[in-house]
Amino acid sequence: MSFRPSFRTTPPRPPRANIITGKWIFKHKLQSDGTLDRYKARWVLRAPCVDFDEMFSPVVKPATIRTVLSLALSKDWLVRISSTSRTRFVDSARPDHVCQLNKSLYGLKQAPRVWYSCFAARLQSLGFIEAKSDTSLFVLQQGSDTSFLLLYVDDIVQTASTTALLHQIIAALQASFPMKDLGPLQHFLGIPITRTAAGMLLSQRQYTLEILERAGTTECKPDSTPVDTQDKLSCDGSPVPDSTLYRSLVGALQYLTFTRPDITYEVQQEPHLTAFKRILRYLCGTVDLGMFLALASSPLTLTVYIDADWAGCPDTRHSTSGYDVFLGDCLVSWSSKRQPTVSRSRAKAKYHAVTNGVAEATWLRQLLLELHQPLQRATIVYCDNVSAVYLSTNPVQHQRTKHVEIDLHFVRERVAAGAVRVLHVPTTSQFADIFTKGLP
């Protein structure tokens, strides 16, 4: 299947033909301030598909988005956004006739892969190379000119070292696909973006207000912190009255962490109604907070802060790992995640966290290499546990380290290669604490 042409009318339904049904989806597209932008209608198929092996959607990673935007800021490149549009369905007003599908539509499980293959093939014909570290990132190098393109389903963010190259790429894509050039990047994935001389502000204020309105907490008394600093809550308790609404709101909070790392720890923990209400009260008083991408330093440096809360879960005694990664002074990646196994010592819990942070740093170094911005210095990984720091360089194996042997070898290889240095940092300077525990 291809994306052009759209539909064509045919004679009445052929015998033994499998007819795929569909429905119209009507939505209100809003501006970044919540006002109405336009009415949107979309034809979506609703029949199950059987002729496919796997599902796929071209979704660029959040860390890739922040990294590319940081690089564009540091180089003062123009960033533009485009959106592909589908040709609209035309009703023939003949109920005994059907339409023959000549293009993929929303609802078909094959559609995202077909769209990605078609779009990627066109980009490659223009000279773009698909990044191995993130297949939704495409890089073009023409002499001294460079261009990056990010693909999130059918939303496209483009930046280039010269305005002429940027407009050339947009014109080439518009000749192949029905695309709208939405101008300089001001709104992406529902996130308003404000660019200043000092950097770029990403805010989800309107999205936060919508969550509070759905939860009925717009007038609640705000809390100063998202997490209670007292003992952690157990999973025991009565079920919530409306589990569907509760799951929907928790999922909405997951997306809010795109620009709000301050709530990441609590959102990633086991669900609890008391903790959930605490987050909503905190958001009620901090709706204007967002994430600021500062200008990247020169030369580029990558710094990682690692932390782990040993046996913090009161039910399973699993530890929580957390890390944050800075490109210069800009926070580009972070994580708060429950460890899959119980750690028998604090050093083991910390070292598992070090492994996760080193893996993320390794991926980001590869990403920067494919963006033609290789790092000249080793990535500094800060950990507040002396034993974990010693384990990263000590080649001696003994009884106490057998159970973390795989993690030991992975980190030590990166240290020996000169890509990573694991250093000690005092707890008072540990930025990753916010991803492992509640802070005052």
Image: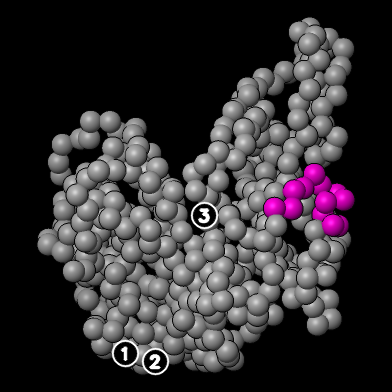
Q: CA distance from mark 2 to mark 1?
A: 13 Å
Mark identifier at residue 340: none
| Depicted 260 relative to depicted 27: above or below | below
Q: CA distance from mark 3 to mark 2?
A: 42 Å
Secondary structure at numbered mark 2: loop
Can you identify the residue that label 3 sits on?
A: 191
The residue segment tinted magenta is 171-182
| Depicted 322 relative to depicted 274: above or below | below
Q: Most extreme residue toward the left, as rendered?
A: 230
| Amino acid type at mark 3 | Ile
- Tell me the quarter of the picture where residue 358 sits: bottom left
| Amino acid type at mark 1 | His
Residue ID at (83%, 9%): 12
Residue 120 in the image: x percent, y percent? 77, 56
Q: Earlier in the sequence, mark 1 or mark 3?
A: 3
In the picture, which quadrant includes the C terminus? bottom left
- Tell me the quarter of the picture where residue 245 sits: top left
Mark identifier at residue 393: 2
Q: Earlier in the sequence, mark 3 or mark 2?
A: 3
Residue 175 in the image: x percent, y percent? 87, 50
Nearest-to-viewer mark from 1 and 3: 3
Secondary structure at numbered mark 3: strand
* Position of residue 223 in the picture relative to residue 413 (left or right): left
Can you identify the residue that label 1 sits on?
A: 424
